[in-house]
Image (cartoon, rainbow, N blue to C red):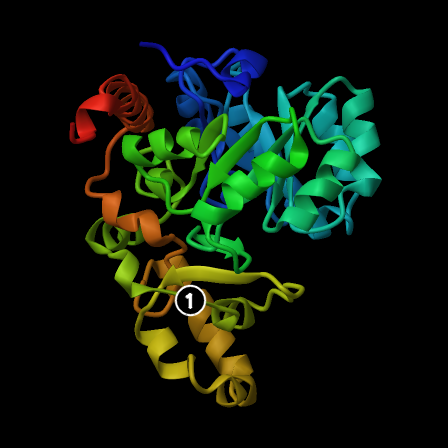
């Protein structure tokens, strides 16, 4: 049984699955691989590095992939949006900040606007500002996010935004999660952690191995690693990562980290470049338990889709009679 939802119909997908635009991880090759496997890939434009984004858009070739931005970072260089719109991506994905200054331009260009939110109030605002798809992101997600859990947030957002397709995000890493999201009323799922260790991912090889060996039990949420990276993230968003030696040293002593910030930021930057994951952050979510191998993105998409189809087809057999 093929899964058909408003999301698959809108973008012509074989699997109702979107790749999260993970900054520095979701490059052109990964986004293209997800699209070619039947989902929709997004390049993680993140902090708006023009040269990086140009290179990764070229790496995607002629495969239709979306582009994702951290909205408050795009506000610092709004001209970058015009450069991206000329490439006619199927969708622009905005997260973390007001979309009001960008929504009209994206819509006028005839490009789908995907907006990620972390609360019902934000979902209503995104709907009012013209979002074509709303991603309801729970706190289980890797990277930056809010405080609400995926399971109660998704149906609340579905109820709040009417006919706009809602995509569930946060802790979804296999077909069981996709099937559950659909039962909550979502039209599909957004996955990031599931693809973090894929072959096409731009994550360091050591970070991929840490994800394969990791557990959701070992993830933490906070602002520690933003401080170490020198990125001034606005409230209320914090970041989920695997715990490591650096976090165990400084998590309970942010004042001490600030006192030693210069040398610690230098140590962190060197560790990131060298793939030292005892210092540098491995940015994954609670769904990391379901990452058990470095494998092609195509295999991940097809497995999630097939497993969800099978579960939905056999749902009645899971109920006692």
- Establish if 3 lies above or below 193: above
Q: Residue at x 42, y 53 (%)?
A: 140
In the image, farthest residue toward the front: 321
**Whole-percent x, y for residue 154 in the image:** 51, 41
* Mark 1 neighbour density, 10 Å: few (under 14) some (14–19) many (20 or more): some
- Establish if 237 lies above or below 166: below
**Whole-percent x, y for residue 244 in the image:** 31, 70
Q: State which quarter of the image contains the C terminus.
A: top left
Write down the residue under mark 1. Answer: 270
Q: Is residue 92 visible?
A: yes
Number of labels in the image equals 1
Q: State which quarter of the image contains the N terminus.
A: top left
In the picture, measured across the screen, residue 243 lies left or right of residue 154, that is left
Q: Residue at x 55, y 72 (%)?
A: 227
**Whole-percent x, y for residue 251 in the image:** 42, 79
Q: Residue at x 43, y 46 (%)?
A: 151
Please state which of residues 42 and 288 is positioned toward the viewer in this rendering.
288
Q: Residue at x 29, y 30 (%)?
A: 175
In the picture, measured across the screen, residue 187 lies left or right of residue 303, that is right
Q: Is residue 23 visible?
A: no
Within the image, what quadrant is residue 162 found in? top right
Element type at mark 1: helix
**Whole-percent x, y for residue 288 in the image:** 29, 49
């Amino acid at each position: 049984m093929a899964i058909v939802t408003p999301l698959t119909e809108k973008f012509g997908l074989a699997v109702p699955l979107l790749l999260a635009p993970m900054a520095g991880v979701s490059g052109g090759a990964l986004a293209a691989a997800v699209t070619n496997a039947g989902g929709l890939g997004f390049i993680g434009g993140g902090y708006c590095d023009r040269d990086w984004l140009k290179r990764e858009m070229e790496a995607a070739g002629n495969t239709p992939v979306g582009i994702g931005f951290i909205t408050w970072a795009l506000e610092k260089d709004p001209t970058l949006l015009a450069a991206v719109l000329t490439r006619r991506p199927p969708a622009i994905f905005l997260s973390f900040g007001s979309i009001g200054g960008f929504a009209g331009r994206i819509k006028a260009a005839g490009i789908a606007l995907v907006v990620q939110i972390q609360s019902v109030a934000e979902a209503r605002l995104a709907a009012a500002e013209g979002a074509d798809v709303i991603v309801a992101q729970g706190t289980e997600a890797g990277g930056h996010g809010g405080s609400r859990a995926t399971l109660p947030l998704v149906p609340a957002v579905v109820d709040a935004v009417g006919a706009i397709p809602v995509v569930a995000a946060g802790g979804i890493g296999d077909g069981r999660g996709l099937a559950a999201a659909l039962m909550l009323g979502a039209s599909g799922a957004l996955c990031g952690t599931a693809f973090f260790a894929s072959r096409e991912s731009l994550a360091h090889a050591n970070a991929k191995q840490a994800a394969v060996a990791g557990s959701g039990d070992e993830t933490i949420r906070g602002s520690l690693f933003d401080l170490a990276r020198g990125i001034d993230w606005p409230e209320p968003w914090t970041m989920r990562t695997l715990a490591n030696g650096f976090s165990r040293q400084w998590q309970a002593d942010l004042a001490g980290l600030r006192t030693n910030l210069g040398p610690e930021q230098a140590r962190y930057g060197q560790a990131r470049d060298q793939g030292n994951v005892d210092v540098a952050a491995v940015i994954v979510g609670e769904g990391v338990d379901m990452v058990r191998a470095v494998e092609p993105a195509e295999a991940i998409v097809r497995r999630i889709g097939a497993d969800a189809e099978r579960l939905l087809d056999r749902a009645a057999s899971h109920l006692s009679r």
